[in-house]
């Protein structure tokens, strides 16, 4: 990591530390979810605490009562969404992750469905399910398909949040003009109005060995 990158990480880390200390109240359930996920050796790729707070605020802003989550992992983001007042339906393909998440979200209004998202999403649509918000934090490779299903399953004026958009576009060298990516896909979709918020993420710095430019896509269904 270059000196410039080290200085950037240190500055962002300092700001995030102050923000966490002042903006995030203590939450034993969230702390226990992180500890339990670590005990079971789940990947340390969950949303950052401030990002979880952002999701909770978004839920409250739109009065979300039904939230769909694609990718449960250990249920950390699920807790943020559920404690904001929503019933959360979460899809997880890994049985171990599902079991840990069930333990972590105990007592909350959460349903975790075990299976591939591309198998589960059509079933939810066939059941006539509609959601106020969809949070997509699943493995990359099928994001365009996930997004299409999310639009079908989200009510008008509901929102869709796709995590790690910038990180993955840069990693796949799709940032250049003319290259197809989730952004070009969403840009052609007249059913939604969308934006991308780039950010510097220190959450993955330890794993990646360098500063990570990341960001999320936020869309509202017209």
Image (cartoon, grey):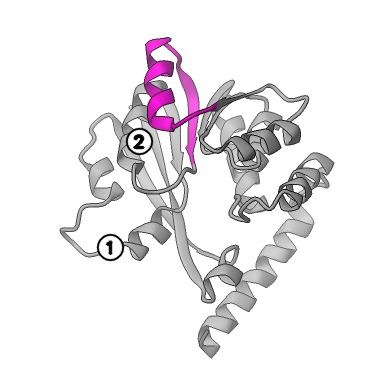
- Relative to 169, 98 lies left or right: right
State the image coordinates of residue 204 (x, y, percent, origin top left): 56, 64
In reply to whether residue 126 is colored magenta, the answer given is: yes
Crowd rating for badge 1 (residues with CA inside 10 Å; few <14, some 14–19, many 20+): some
In reply to whether residue 140 is colored magenta, the answer given is: no
Q: Residue, x 78% and y 58% (percent of image)?
A: 21
The residue positioned farthest toward the bottom in the image shown = 3
**Residue wearing tag 2:** 147
The first of marks 2 and 1 along the sequence is: 2
Q: CA distance from mark 2 to mark 1?
A: 19 Å
Examine the rendered structure and indicate whether residue 72 appears above or below residue 87: below
Q: Which mark is on residue 175?
A: 1
Examine the rendered structure and indicate whether residue 102 appears above or below residue 5: above
The residue positioned farthest toward the left in the image shown = 178
Picture quadrant where residue 155 is located: top left
Give, as a single range, the part of the protein colored magenta: 114-136
Nearer to me, 212 or 222: 212
- Relative to 1, 196 lies left or right: left
**Regarding mark 1 in the picture, which secondary structure is present there?**
loop
Examine the rendered structure and indicate whether residue 63 appears above or below residue 196: above
Picture quadrant where residue 56 is located: top right
Identify the image quadrant of the C terminus.
top left
State the image coordinates of residue 22 (x, y, percent, origin top left): 77, 56
The residue positioned farthest toward the front in the image shown = 95
Callouts 2 and 1 close, C-beta under 8 Å: no
Q: Is residue 42 visible?
A: yes
State the image coordinates of residue 20 (x, y, percent, origin top left): 73, 57
**Regarding mark 2 in the picture, which secondary structure is present there?**
helix
- Relative to 206, 34 lies left or right: right
The residue positioned farthest toward the top in the image shown = 127
Crowd rating for badge 2 (residues with CA inside 10 Å; few <14, some 14–19, many 20+): many
Q: Residue, x 43% and y 35% (percent of image)?
A: 160
């Amino acid at each position: 990591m270059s000196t410039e990158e080290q200085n950037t990480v240190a500055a962002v880390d300092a700001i995030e530390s102050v923000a966490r200390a002042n903006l995030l109240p203590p939450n034993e359930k969230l702390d226990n979810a992180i500890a339990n996920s670590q005990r079971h050796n789940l990947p340390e790729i969950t949303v950052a605490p401030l990002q979880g707070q952002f999701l909770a605020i978004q839920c409250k802003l739109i009065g979300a009562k039904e939230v769909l989550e694609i990718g449960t992992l250990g249920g950390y983001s699920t807790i943020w969404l559920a404690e904001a007042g929503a019933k959360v339906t979460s899809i997880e393909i890994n049985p171990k992750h599902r079991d840990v998440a069930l333990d972590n979200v105990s007592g909350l209004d959460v349903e975790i469905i075990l299976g591939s998202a591309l198998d589960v999403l059509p079933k939810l649509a066939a059941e006539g399910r509609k959601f106020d918000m969809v949070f997509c934090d699943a493995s990359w490779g099928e994001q365009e398909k996930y997004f299409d299903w999310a639009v079908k399953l989200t009510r008008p004026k509901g929102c869709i949040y796709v995590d790690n958009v910038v990180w993955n576009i840069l990693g796949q060298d799709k940032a250049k003009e003319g290259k197809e990516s989730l952004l070009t896909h969403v840009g052609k979709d007249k059913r939604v109005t969308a934006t991308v918020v780039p950010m510097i993420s220190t959450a993955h710095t330890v794993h990646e060995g360098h500063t990570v430019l990341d960001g999320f896509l936020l869309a509202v269904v017209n």
